[in-house]
């Protein structure tokens, strides 16, 4: 996404707004540290590009993109029109304008947006054995601000 893209600005504002409530919604990028502190081994991460909208050529990615778009549209109700953006000091009118711009941006399929989705996996070490334990942790988290 470009620096001045409505969706990028929306997600950056979401990061700031959720931080006011003590939440880190970009946690998917730094999960490794938490898994290491918890004692997991063989930690790995697979990063997948997820389209935001039905623009992808691949049929499956097109469907995933449609779901991502719907999730983003639903998220507007919770973030922009809810407490997070109100906590940022936006008036009700400003929040309605934000919501309209976001809906317009999401419905513009000529802009091919995507975000990185992080799939983390790790193993719990077994005592007295090598690091060939069974998988016990898996975390998937989006990072929608990647260009």
Image (tube, helix red, strand yellow):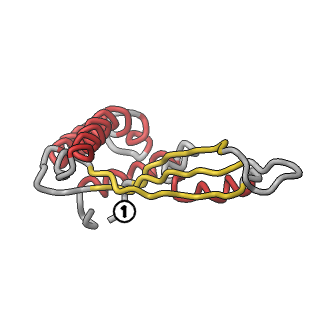
Q: Which residue is mark 1?
A: 146
Callout 1: SS: loop
- Name the image quarter holding the C terminus: bottom left
Q: Nearer the viewer, residue 4 or 128?
A: 128
Q: Residue 80 location, x and y as percent?
A: 33, 39
Q: Residue 67 location, x and y as percent?
A: 28, 37
Residue extending farthest to the right is: 128
User: In the visual, does 18 lie left or right of 99?
Assistant: right
Q: Residue at x 25, y 66 (%)?
A: 2
| Residue 12 visible within the image | no
Q: Residue at x 39, y 39 (%)?
A: 86
User: In the visual, does 100 lie left or right of 40?
Assistant: left
| Residue 15 visible within the image | yes
Q: Residue at x 47, y 53 (%)?
A: 118
- Measured along the vertical axis of the image, is residue 99 above or below residue 47? above
Q: Quadrant of residue 79?
A: top left
User: In the visual, does 144 lie left or right of 44?
Assistant: left
């Amino acid at each position: 996404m470009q620096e001045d893209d409505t969706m990028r600005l929306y997600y950056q504002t979401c990061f700031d707004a959720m931080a006011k409530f003590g939440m880190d919604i970009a946690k998917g990028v730094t999960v490794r540290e938490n898994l290491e502190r918890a004692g997991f081994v063989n930690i790995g991460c697979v990063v997948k590009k997820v389209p935001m909208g039905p623009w992808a050529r691949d049929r499956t990615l097109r469907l995933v993109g449609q779901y991502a778009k719907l999730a983003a549209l639903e998220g507007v109700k919770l973030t922009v029109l809810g407490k997070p953006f109100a906590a940022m000091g936006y008036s009700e009118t400003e929040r309605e304008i934000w919501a309209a711009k976001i809906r317009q941006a999401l419905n513009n399929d000529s802009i091919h947006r995507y975000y990185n989705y992080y799939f983390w996996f790790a193993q719990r070490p077994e005592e007295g054995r090598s690091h060939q334990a069974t998988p016990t942790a898996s975390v998937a988290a989006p990072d929608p601000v990647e260009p």
